[in-house]
Image: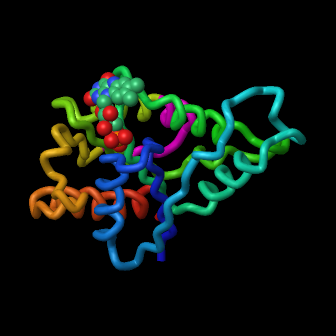
Amino acid sequence: MKNIIFVCGSLRKGSYNRIYMETMMQHVPEDWNIKEVSFKDVPVYNFDLEGDNEPQAVTTFRDALSEADGIIIVTPEYNTGVPGPLKNAIDWASRVKNKGDRSPLVNRPFAVAGCSPGATGSALSQAQLRQTLTAMNAHIMPGPKLIIGKVHELITPEGKIEDQRSISYMERFLNAFDEYIEKVNP
Ligand code: FNR
């Protein structure tokens, strides 16, 4: 069994990225134990809140990432970059509560995906996310990529993605991540 965590970069109700992520979660390899982890309660980063003053939501978020064999982030793009709340949560996760601890980002396998109603499908946000995770010595699956433009056209009136081509892209991505995790952590 692999413990895989999904993180959605958007907090809004009705998020396209959430719909996309929830569809992915229905098509994971059989031996995955999956869970969504949210950063919605993680406060704005402040060095003064580190260590003994660390907010519980930060500890909870970081601990959840620590338990994962792999982490999949599905994110929109804001102003050609990573949405602030997601970047904020990653910045917190890059820090440690106690001296000598190791950030859960280090050596952890990640896969990055995302979508937007625009044509560029979160490509720039994903590129920035890769840059940040690389700086933390995370392992980031190089490909295949899921950069989904015009995502609203894929969503049914019931708020689902049922399009077979989209689902087969997702399955290819998820199976590749399964192999990537085994390559990184044999
Ligand atoms: C956006 N959006 C956007 N889209 C894009 O493709 N490139 C961009 O740079 C931006 N910039 C941007 C900034 C801000 C502040 C917002 C709120 C939105 C549009 C964005 O892709 C769209 O709102 C998505 O629907 C957001 O994703 P969710 O919440 O639907 O998952």
Answer with left or right where residue 119 lies relative to residue 84.
Answer: left
Of the pair 165 and 132, the residue shown nearer to us: 165
Image x and y of residue 7, in percent? 47, 51
Q: Is residue 86 above or below residue 110?
A: above
Task: Examine the rendering and report whether any part of residue 124 can be seen.
Answer: no
Q: Is residue 121 above or below residue 171?
A: above
Image x and y of residue 16, in percent? 30, 47
Answer with left or right where residue 60 lies relative to residue 38.
Answer: right
Task: Examine the rendering and report whether any part of residue 181 can be seen.
Answer: yes
Point 29% across, 62% down: residue: 23
Question: Splitting the image into 4 quarters, where does residue 147 fall?
Answer: top left
133 falls in the magenta region: yes
Q: Residue furthest right?
A: 52
15 falls in the magenta region: no
Point 15% across, 62% down: residue: 168
- All told, the count of numbered labels is 0
Question: Splitting the image into 4 quarters, where does residue 125 fall?
Answer: top left
Image x and y of residue 149, in percent? 18, 38
Of the pair 109 and 157, the residue shown nearer to us: 157
Q: Residue furthest front?
A: 157
Of the pair 73 and 149, the residue shown nearer to us: 149
Point 67% across, 44% down: residue: 103
Image x and y of residue 26, in percent? 31, 70
Q: Which residues are magenta?
A: 132-142
Point 87% across, 39% down: residue: 53
Q: Quadrant of ligand 1?
A: top left
